[in-house]
Image: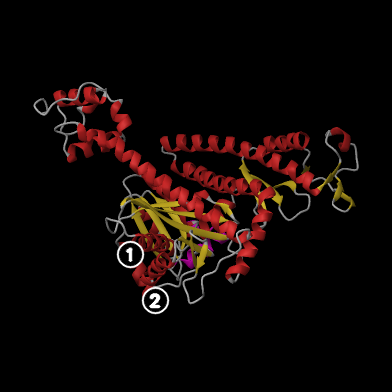
Amino acid sequence: MPAASRSEVIREKVRQLPDGPGVYLMKDRLGRIIYVGKAKSLKKRVSTYFQAGRGRALRHQPKIRTLIEMIADFEILEVKSEPEALLLEGKLIKQWRPKYNTDFTDDKRFLLVRIDLEAELPKFVLTRFKKDGRSRYFGPFAHSSLLRKTLATMRQKFGVLLADTHPRKIAPDTWQLYDDVRAELYGWPNTVTTAEYRERVTAACAFLDGKSREWLTSLRAEMAARAAKQEFEKAAELRDVVLALEQTLARTRKFTRDLTKLQPNRAALQELQDALGLESPPVHMECFDISHISGTFVVASMVHFTDGRPDKDEYRRFSIKSFIGNDDFKAMEEVVSRRYRRLIAEQKQFPDLVVIDGGRGQVGAALKAFVGLECAPPAMIGLAKKAETIIFPDARAPLNLPLGHPGLGLLQRLRDEAHRFANTYNADLRSRKIRESVLDDFPGLGAKRKAALLAHFGSLDKLRGATVEKITQVPGFGEKFAAQLHAFLAGAKPVTSADAP
């Protein structure tokens, strides 16, 4: 579309904007979401981006000027109140990580603690900016003086290095940390190997992680208090820092584990790349499994491994919606389609390898899902459990790796985790159904009133703990019927059909 026509379309959309609260999503010319914002009045707020002069109030920073120049379209989501807009804005920022929201959040001038993963002896260094992708960061921390005291305590408690040290290599894989009085003051061996020092780093990271969590709890409380006072701009600033800290903590937890466990996984990933003929090691892998009991309680799971380790934040589980019955192939097609349709909509990358629990039929069903999505699938295989046979979606013959093969071991762990996650979900559904079926034994309680009860109380356990007065608050329940249900749930003799209203 020509630029002039696009501008006219945007101006018309702005004229039709509602005057209520909501969230707006700014897009570039490729349709990518580059910024998410909230507004008390969508009409007033969004229009400032497209006024003559491009909204002088928004152009006081170069980064904001660049954002305005990149906007080619926008969408809005209306909500009922300004607090709801605040919460929805945060959710969408966390979900999509738009470029300019990320930049603004990362520019908060709170202190971070950086650890260079590629250094032989990682140091704990203070910084206000995220400078590279190879390091791990703790924070942000608001109180610089307390943070510096924390690092000083950490140096004595764990024997780790800060920015002011210059360790010296005195032999292969042997280091002298200090050449001054600090060698005696800190009470740790001054001569260490790389492995010995990394053990200290692991302990220090866990300690610093705890300090970060204390700060996160405090920030959340202050954010809620500001929102309750309707100080929404301050609450939004605090929320941005909370989001940044949550993401930092997630990366930090992975780093602490990786110090001891990542290297063997990388070797297994390399072996798997070679065995499957992949272009690169499958750092991100997803596995799907279907679980049911004779065609009932049909569910599916998807687990995600990053660097050969479970990444539980990315796990997903599915209830089958497109049919009722026992058809593993249709179920697999449905869940694979739902998973990657969502990734496409959210403009997120596909994994490096998709693993299907099953043989050629299940792999074919997964492939059919990508045909329906009209997109090329990522690298994909099936793992048939009987002989641990690897099935390819193309004309390649099935592959059986030696049972001790590191790559096969990694695939088995991935598949077994998907199986465990699916079975757990299936068991949860069956348990919930069994608990709720107790209500079926109470005469006169039809499907509508049963649904109203569960919708009102949320679970059978909460219903059991409710008083007669609370039960009468549910539509369709008079005092007599509520008293009979209360007695029934308390273990009294069930009422008869003649007693029921």
Question: Which residues are the magenta region?
Answer: 57-71
**Farthest residue toward the bottom?**
2
- Is tag 2's residue or tag 1's residue first in the polypeptide sequence? 2
Q: Separation of disc 2 and disc 1 at Cα? A: 14 Å
Q: How many marks?
A: 2
Q: Which mark is residue 13?
A: 1
Residue 155 seen from this side: yes
Q: Which mark is residue 262?
A: none
Q: Quadrant of residue 132?
A: bottom right
State the residue in front, 347 or 39.
347
Q: Is residue 239 above or below residue 14?
A: above
Q: Secondary structure at mark 1?
A: helix
**Place of residue 24 in the rendered image (x, y in percent of width and height, measured from the top left):** 39, 56
Q: Secondary structure at mark 2?
A: helix
* Location of mark 2 (residue): 4
In the rendered structure, are the residues bearing label 2 and label 1 in contact, judged by CB atoms less than 8 Å apart? no
